[in-house]
Image (cartoon, rainbow, N blue to C red):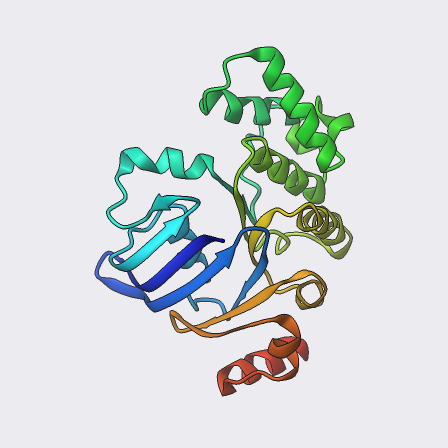
């Protein structure tokens, strides 16, 4: 069953056309990789899915929320069903790990302090950060901060997770920490759409690959077909550049 579906969508940022005739769907439980050169439209596509950019033409649905004519007042409800993980963590630097998660839960209607505390420990345990919950975020490594950011997104029990270059600011050892958490989530059946250049990871974990170029989806296929028998010349060129980098 599709949890994300876009059909013939066109997206503008102001008067600037950034996505054109984009159609794809993601089924519940799938791990989907979205790749392409810088400026190809990947982040804009994610912004459309979580309501930061309006859907101008075509149709779209995410976790039961219609993107067509999405009202500003409806965006918080959409985002409660989506976990979003950014490359720069976006944690509150003046608060502890625990306080960062508590802030989000309180903001989304969790009034019971004991239930919030229980949920915080639960999701921090999922990412191996329960023993550092009292640490300030500036006291922990980049990889640990990203794991906390993932826990923060998981705290609201989202239907889908969106990752926008979650490892680009990390060194190789920290990247492994974050990818291990994502593998665990995939094994547990979390639906995920991931933007990253970690191609080895994609081959191991992904159910689908989506390649974007110049604001369009050029190719969508299973990893084996995508890497070994791409149909588009643009896909072949991109893969040759990134795999030989």
Residue 203, above or below 68: below
Instruction: Residue at 49%, 53% (x, y): give it.
Output: 1
Q: Nearer the viewer, residue 137 or 34?
A: 34
Q: Nearer the viewer, residue 215 or 1?
A: 1
Q: Position of residue 28 (x, y in %)?
A: 54, 51
Instruction: Residue at 57%, 84% (x, y): give it.
Output: 236
Farthest residue, direction left: 15
Residue 245 visible in this rendered orientation of the protein: no
Horizontally, residue 168 falls left or right of residue 187, namely: left
Instruction: Residue at 39%, 73% (x, y): give it.
Output: 214
Residue 97, above or below 228: above
Q: Position of residue 53 (x, y in %)?
A: 32, 51
Q: Position of residue 142 (x, y in %)?
A: 68, 43
Farthest residue, direction bottom: 233
Residue 242 visible in this rendered orientation of the protein: yes
Residue 61, above or below 130: below
Quarter of the image for residue 76 reads top left
Quarter of the image for residue 25 reads bottom left
């Amino acid at each position: 069953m599709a949890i994300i579906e876009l059909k013939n969508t066109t997206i503008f940022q102001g008067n600037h056309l950034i996505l054109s005739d984009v159609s794809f769907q993601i089924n519940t439980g799938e791990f989907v990789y979205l790749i392409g050169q810088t400026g190809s439209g990947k982040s804009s596509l994610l912004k459309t899915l979580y309501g930061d950019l309006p859907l101008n033409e075509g149709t779209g649905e995410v976790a039961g929320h219609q993107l067509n004519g999405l009202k500003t007042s409806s965006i918080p409800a959409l985002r409660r069903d989506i976990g979003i993980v950014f490359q720069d963590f976006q944690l509150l630097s003046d608060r502890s790990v625990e306080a960062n998660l508590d802030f989000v839960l309180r903001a989304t209607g969790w009034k019971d302090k004991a239930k919030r505390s229980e949920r915080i420990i639960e999701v921090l345990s999922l990412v191996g950060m329960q023993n550092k919950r009292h640490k300030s975020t500036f006291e922990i490594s980049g990889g640990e901060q990203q794991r906390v950011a993932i826990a923060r997104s998981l705290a609201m029990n989202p239907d889908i997770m969106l990752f926008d270059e979650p490892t680009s600011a990390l060194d190789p050892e920290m990247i492994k920490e974050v990818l291990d958490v994502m593998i665990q989530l995939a094994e547990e059946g979390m639906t995920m759409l991931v933007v990253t250049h970690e191609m080895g990871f994609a081959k191991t974990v992904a159910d689908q690959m989506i390649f974007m170029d110049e604001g369009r989806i050029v190719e969508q296929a299973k990893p084996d077909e995508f890497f070994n028998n791409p149909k588009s010349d643009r896909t072949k060129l991109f893969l040759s550049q990134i795999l030989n980098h």
